[in-house]
Image (cartoon, rainbow, N blue to C red):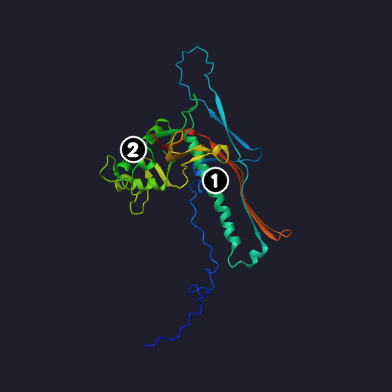
């Protein structure tokens, strides 16, 4: 059978489709999935938020421990028992800004919507940055020392290992070990009189995998047992709703390095070989106005877009003006691995 003369008309001499016009998917711009902002999206559930009308700092008071009652003999004068207060503050950070300047000629000739793409990035990137800062603030709260006469400080459970994976292996043994650490954290919070309602435990994806190995070979009832968990934990969905009284939330934003940049109130050493170790989980609890972290907010997310005729550009920005810090450290807890 003879071959027809099917000319490869898109060949440029080097590749078969060298003359083919590169087309996009109808102007589609792809963005990698951004990390979930679990604290930022539900901030009032985990932090006490104060809006500032003036000034840049909010002061909060902490009362002293309650003295025991005294036996009284009628006729003796009651002069009042001792009490005192101490205070703390949460201060605004510098304004955090995300901004772009788009040239007019590029904007009008672009075959995709650059403005929509950049607007999406402004809000998302700011939210992610503050979500990370909130977790750093929460970790600092959990590591806060006791203040004599006022509170016992943050709650910490620590194990010695070279890495988180070495301390909590993705196996039945590792799942049991982590479960035991969570049970210990719940115990020390009970002893600290932290209300049982409103306890949340944030874990990274790796610990979610570790807990997936929970089975009947361990000391504890498996977290997937329907009778023990009321069906809130489902192995095939990888859904972990509750563990030792904590609501469980997955996050990619637990710090794992020594953070020495950015505002000083968020700088924390979270390296496993650092000063105290790396968090494998962070508990943030909330009961009324008692919350591990406090947030002051001068204004919510502000956005602006305008054409600059002097430069033939379109300027766009988003900004946040808030700050976070330790409020009630006894409402925070850390499960960490410290390199031996």
> To which quarter of the image does residue 203 belong?
top left
Q: Would residue 301 be found to the left or right of residue 239 on screen?
A: right
Q: Quadrant of the C terminus?
A: top left
Find residue 130 and name its label: 1
Residue at image position (54%, 73%) is 21
Image vertical order of residue 263 relative to residue 319, above or below:
above
**What residue sits right under mark 2 in the picture?**
180
- Residue 25 percent location from the top left of the image: 52, 68
Residue 222 location in percent, x, y? 30, 45
Going by the picture, which residue comes out furthest to the bottom? 1
Please give the name of the residue rendered at 42% of the width and 33% of the height, measured from the top-left corner.
156
Q: Nearer the viewer, residue 235 or 112?
A: 112
State whether residue 325 appears in this view: yes
Image point 64% across, 64% down: which residue? 106
Judge by depth and name the residue closer to the eye, 104 or 298: 104
Relative image position of residue 329 (x, y in whole percent): 49, 33
Where residue 68 appears, x then y in whole percent?
45, 21
As drawn, which residue projects farthest toward the left?
217
Label 2 close to label 1 by CB (< 8 Å): no
Mark 2–mark 1 distance (CA, rounded to whole Å): 31 Å
Number of dots carrying numbers: 2
Mark nearer the N terminus (2 vs 1): 1
Q: Is residue 288 visible?
A: no
Q: Which residue is farthest top?
A: 75
Label 1 environment density (alpha carbons within 10 Å; few <14, some 14–19, many ≥20): some
**SS of the residue under disc 2:** helix
Quarter occupied by the N terminus: bottom left
In the rendered image, the vertical position of residue 162 relative to residue 25, given as above or below: above
Q: Which mark is residue 146?
A: none
Q: Where, by quadrant of the figure, is residue 261 drawn? A: top right
Can you name the residue that lies furthest to the right here? Answer: 310
Q: Secondary structure at mark 1?
A: helix
């Amino acid at each position: 059978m003879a071959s027809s003369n099917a000319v490869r008309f898109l060949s440029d001499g080097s590749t078969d489709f060298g003359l083919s016009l590169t087309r996009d998917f109808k102007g589609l711009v792809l963005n990698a999935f951004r990390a979930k902002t679990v604290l930022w999206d539900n901030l009032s559930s985990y932090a006490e938020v104060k809006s500032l009308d003036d000034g840049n700092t909010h002061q909060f008071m902490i009362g002293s421990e309650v003295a025991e009652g005294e036996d009284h003999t009628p006729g003796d004068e009651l002069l009042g028992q001792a009490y005192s207060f101490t205070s703390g503050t949460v201060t605004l950070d510098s304004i955090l800004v995300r901004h772009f300047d788009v040239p007019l000629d590029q904007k009008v000739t672009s075959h995709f919507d650059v403005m929509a793409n950049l607007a999406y990035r402004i809000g998302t990137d700011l939210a992610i940055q503050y979500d990370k800062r909130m977790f750093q603030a929460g970790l600092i709260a959990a590591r806060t020392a006791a203040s004599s006469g006022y509170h016992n400080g943050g709650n910490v459970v620590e194990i010695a290992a070279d890495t988180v994976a070495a301390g909590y292996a993705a196996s039945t043994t590792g799942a049991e070990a982590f479960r035991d650490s969570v049970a210990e954290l719940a115990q020390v919070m009970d002893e600290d009189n932290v209300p049982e309602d409103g306890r949340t435990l944030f874990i990274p994806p790796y610990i979610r995998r570790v807990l997936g190995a929970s089975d009947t070979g361990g000391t504890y009832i498996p977290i997937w047992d329907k009778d023990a968990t009321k069906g809130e934990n489902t192995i095939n969905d990888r859904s972990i709703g509750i563990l030792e009284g904590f609501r469980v939330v997955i996050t990619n934003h637990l710090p794992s390095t020594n953070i020495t940049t950015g505002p000083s109130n968020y700088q924390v050493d979270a390296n496993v070989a650092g000063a105290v170790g790396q968090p494998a989980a962070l508990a943030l609890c909330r009961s009324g106005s008692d919350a591990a972290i406090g947030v002051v907010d001068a204004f919510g997310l502000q956005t602006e877009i305008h054409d600059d005729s002097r430069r033939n550009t379109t300027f766009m920005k988003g900004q946040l003006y808030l700050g976070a810090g330790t409020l009630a450290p006894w409402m925070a807890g850390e499960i960490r691995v410290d390199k031996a």
